[in-house]
């Protein structure tokens, strides 16, 4: 395939070449979905290796686009972890789904601007509709509630805390104090730093033995700050910590926020979607009382990256915080029912994220998502049962919202804590080096432990057992 001079100057391909190219892209994606489980989930390369492969000056002249495509297929894509692999257990996997991938392809192909109503009323309406679905699922106020799709949980948390600061503190937040647990996600700390808060304005509340925010310590901290003339204004609770899946006592925190007149933000980026299962709904009681709630559809709602979401009890909080009356936007304001989402968040230019959630939910139906989430929670429970029946493994943190932490500590052996830490760290490293599974460590109660996050509905108990057997093959005799 070759480009004509006319096509080059217009940055386009012929219709026939576009079809041929497009079919190859779709074929590659289908092949990936169909065979990913047969590949190794871990990509391992040094910076020197990647520089040697990719580093080059910007090309001045055209290349055969078939050669470019082939290079990407053979060199770029294989050098990335397969986060949708059944044995990708670490961090938070990204199971994704094919319908949403195709929806993203459509949204990108048509290059739809999803910032304002006048530019794309359909895109705005789809976002309104899908946002209303989520408001209903989390029992937020149907008439006043609102929200916005973001790039991920980090941007959703930043948007929430910006809104909270503006609504509760106005322009002077010099005495404002924020409370969160020692298990709160780092994106909240980053957001607080971006917003100009000092370290002295953040209270890190210890957690209990179940890694939940300690209520008495929280109350004491608020009381002390008030006595010192400071301004407590926001509590950040977590609905599904990354480390353990633990859920802070949402109902109790909601009561404190009501009595103390504090903004109640819930970071449910990881665990919020578990509300679609019976066990998850029980654990998440009180989440509906939040002033703002972060969820990440690109995690446990099986959407491809990037897709986060912020829900708020009153949509006017967003517009009052982010709306700017720029002269060049004066002709596209529309009426009050025609929502311009650039007025509800940081971004003016926004991609059409809502389409993938809309199309996948319409295609598979809510029941399928409920079943997938329930399966993951049950799988983690089954893994815990399996570990507890083994003489080799010790459960450190029980299965909670599909996350479980454990370590190799065989009965009959007398390893010191330092030796156990080194042993489990080495097991993890060997597993990753084998590329057969992605299983890394975290630290709980000063112990190095192995952590599994099991939200992929295509992961089986056998996948887990095979990985544990691989871990056992890397015991002290091999280290």
Image (cartoon, rainbow, N blue to C red):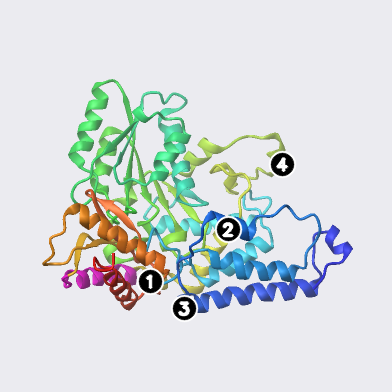
- Magenta extent: 374-391
Is 176 situated above or below 63? above
Residue 316 falls left or right of residue 401: right
Structural crowding at the residue carrying mark 4, measured as other residues with C-alpha within 10 Å and reported as few (<14), some (14–19) or many (≥20): few
Residue 57 falls left or right of residue 158: right
Residue at the limit of the structure toward the right, as seen here: 6
Name the disc covering residue 50, or none.
2
**Residue in front for this viewpoint, 427 or 126:** 427
Q: Secondary structure at mark 4?
A: helix
Q: Secondary structure at mark 1?
A: helix
Labelled pair 3, 2 in contact (Cβ < 8 Å): no
> Residue 458 appears at what percent x and percent y?
40, 74
Labelled pair 4, 2 in contact (Cβ < 8 Å): no
- Give me the C-alpha separation between circle 1 and circle 3: 21 Å
* Residue at 61% from the left image edge and 74% from the top image edge: 28
Name the disc covering residue 372, or none.
1
**Residue in front for this viewpoint, 12 or 141:** 12
Of the two numbered discs 4 and 1 on the same chain, state the one appearing first in sequence: 4
Residue placed under numbered mark 3 in the picture:
38
- Give me the C-alpha separation between circle 3 and circle 4: 54 Å
Residue placed under numbered mark 4 in the picture:
331
């Amino acid at each position: 395939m070759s480009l004509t001079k006319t096509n080059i100057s217009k940055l386009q391909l012929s219709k026939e070449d576009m079809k041929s190219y497009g079919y190859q892209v779709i074929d590659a994606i289908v092949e990936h979905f169909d065979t990913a489980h047969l590949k190794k989930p871990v990509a391992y390369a040094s910076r020197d290796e990647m520089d040697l492969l990719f580093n080059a000056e910007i090309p001045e002249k055209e290349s055969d686009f078939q050669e470019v495509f082939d290079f990407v297929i053979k060199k770029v894509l294989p050098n990335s972890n397969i986060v949708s692999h059944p044995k990708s257990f670490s961090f938070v996997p990204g199971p994704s789904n094919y319908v949403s991938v195709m929806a993203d392809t459509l949204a990108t192909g048509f290059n739809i601007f999803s910032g304002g109503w006048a530019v794309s009323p359909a895109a705005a309406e789809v976002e309104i509709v899908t946002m209303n679905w989520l408001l209903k699922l989390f029992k937020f106020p149907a008439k006043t509630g609102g929200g916005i799709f973001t790039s991920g949980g980090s941007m959703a948390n930043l948007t929430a805390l910006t809104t909270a600061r503006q609504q509760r503190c106005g322009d002077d937040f010099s005495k404002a104090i924020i409370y969160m647990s020692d298990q709160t996600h780092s994106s909240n700390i980053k957001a607080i730093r971006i917003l100009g808060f000092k370290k002295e304005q953040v209270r890190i509340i210890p957690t209990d033995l179940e890694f939940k925010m300690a209520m008495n310590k929280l109350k004491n901290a608020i009381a002390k700050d008030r006595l010192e003339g400071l301004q407590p204004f926001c509590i950040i609770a977590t609905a599904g910590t990354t480390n353990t899946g633990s859920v802070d006592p949402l109902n109790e925190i909601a009561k404190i926020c009501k009595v103390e007149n504090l903004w109640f933000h819930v970071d449910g980026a990881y665990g919020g979607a578990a509300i679609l299962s019976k066990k998850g709904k029980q654990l998440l009681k009180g989440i509906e009382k939040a002033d703002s709630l972060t969820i990440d559809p690109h995690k446990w709602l099986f959407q491809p990256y990037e897709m986060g979401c912020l829900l708020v009890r009153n949509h006017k909080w967003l517009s009052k915080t982010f709306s700017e009356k720029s002269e060049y936007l004066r002709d596209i304001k529309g009426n009050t029912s025609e929502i311009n989402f650039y007025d509800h968040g940081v971004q003016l230019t926004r991609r059409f994220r809502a389409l993938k959630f809309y199309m996948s939910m319409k295609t598979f139906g809510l029941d399928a998502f409920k079943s997938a989430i329930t399966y993951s929670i049950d799988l983690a429970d089954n893994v815990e049962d399996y570990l507890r029946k083994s003489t080799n493994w010790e459960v450190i943190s029980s299965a909670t919202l599909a996350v479980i932490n454990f370590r190799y500590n065989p009965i009959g052996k007398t390893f010191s804590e330092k030796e156990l830490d080194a042993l489990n760290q080495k097991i993890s490293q060997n597993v990753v080096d084998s590329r057969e599974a992605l299983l890394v460590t975290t630290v709980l109660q000063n112990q190095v432990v192995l952590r599994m996050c099991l939200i992929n509905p295509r992961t089986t108990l056998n996948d887990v057992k095979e990985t544990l057997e691989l871990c056992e093959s890397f015991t002290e005799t091999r280290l």
